[in-house]
Every structure is written in structure tokens, then in C-alpha cells.
Image: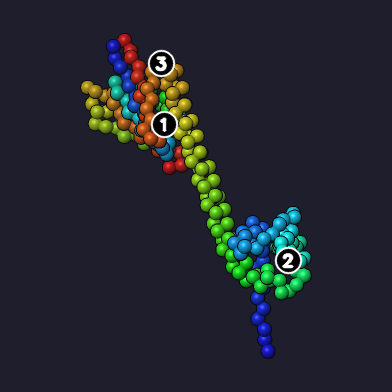
Amino acid sequence: MAEKRISITIDESGKITAKTDGIKGEMCLIELEEILGEEISAMSVKKTDEYYQRINPGQKNIQKQGVGK
Amino acid sequence: MSAVVQTLTPFIEKSCLLKALQYMEIRFSEQRDKILIQGETDTYFDRELSGKFKLTCYFYTSSVVTMLPQIEQKYIQFYKEHMKELEEKRLEAERARIENERRAYVEKQRQEIIKKAEAKGYKIKEKRNGNEIQLVLVKHTY
């Protein structure tokens, strides 16, 4: 049984930080797009080394600036 | 020959004038926009069309007349305090409005994320850390 985990933090200013675990390849970005909506286009995506590692490609860190920031 | 004439500060804010009279221990009663001085014959402040309160008295030797400069000083002091208080209230109201807007925005984000995650079959654990919201979405697949 595999586990998909998305940790999302919304800080007091509305800034969102999201991190996926257990979602492989590009699917992690697609999954985040579906949950965070169109606003993901305003996000700055920081791809970690792991993103490029095919062995464990399912982890990404994504940071989004809140509106007005 | 020249002359310099200075008028009193116009008593426009009634509450400040009343406070000044109270401070000076001048007894009075109110009738709409008329402030009747007690213990003095026909002595009262009433509001002119211009908006200021003008002192009318039967005797120019009235104690209120002699106290006008002190009443004016206290009026100015209370007026400044009143203005400061109003400014603080205005700023507080503005601060509350901005804060409510921010809270509403964050809450909307939270609700939308939860709604979409639930629709995708995630279980959601939520934790609050002060003003920060932490959501952990978990889904098991076989």
C-alpha cells in the first residue's frame, strides 16, 4: 500500500508552502495543481535535486506568494 | 496707532466645552444646544448658526466671563485629546478592517484546498500553529 502525502502550510499572510511525498515524477506537480487550483501558476517552483533523480522523483518543494505580496 | 485683537478659540465641540466647564467646577444644565450656567443670572452658552457656542450673560462681571481664558485653555486641551482619541479609533477600525480581510482570504484558501483535496479522496489532518495553518493530506493507494 503506497501513501501519497501533501503537506501544506498557509502562513498568516496567506503565503502557501506545499511539499509532496510519495508522488512520483511530474504527477506531484499535477496533483498540486488540482488541489491548489489555478493559483499554482503564480507559484515559484523550487525543484530539489530529488526532482531530477529518477530513483525518487516524487518529492518537490513548491512555494507560493500570497496575493498582494 | 495700532491694535491687536485676538478672539477666543471658538467653542465648537460641545463635549469638550462641557468637560472644560466641569473641570473649572462651573455648574451647568443643558437644554438642547443651550448650556445654562447655574447660580448666574441669564448666563448661558448657546450655539450660533456658525456652529460655535457663544457666551451670553446678564452681568459682564459674571465669574464665567472672568474664567473664560481658563475655560478656553481647558477646551483646547480636551479638544486635542478628543481628536487624538478619534484618530486612534479610526486607525484601530482601519487596522481591524485590513486584518479581517486577511483572515477572510486565508480562510477561503483553506476551505478551497480542503474541498478539492476531499474530492480527490485525501484524508485531511489540520493543525494550527498560531496564525499558521498546517494541512496534511494523506491518500493510500493499492
Tell which of A58 and A6 is nearer to you: A6
Q: Which residue position is annotated with label 3?
A: B121
Q: Chain of mark 3?
A: B
Mark 1: secondary structure: helix
**Amino acid type, mark 1:** Ile
Residue B135 image point, x, y percent? 37, 26
Mark 3: secondary structure: loop
Instruction: Give the colour scheme of this rendering.
Output: rainbow
Q: Quadrant of the C terminus of chain B?
A: top left
Q: Left or right of A58: which side holds B121?
A: right
The reply to whether callout 3 and callout 1 are in contact (CB within 8 Å) is: no
Q: Quadrant of the N terminus of chain B?
A: bottom right
Tell which of B3 and B17 is nearer to you: B17
Q: Which residue position is annotated with label 1?
A: A40
Q: Can you tell which of label 3 and label 2 is closer to the viewer? A: 2
Q: Which numbered dot is residue B40? A: 2
Q: Can you tell which of label 3 and label 1 is closer to the viewer? A: 3
Q: Chain of mark 1?
A: A
**Circle 2: is it few (<14), some (14-19), or many (20+) Cα within 10 Å?**
some
Residue A12 image point, x, y percent? 41, 37
Q: Does residue A41 sit above or below B80 in this rendering? A: above
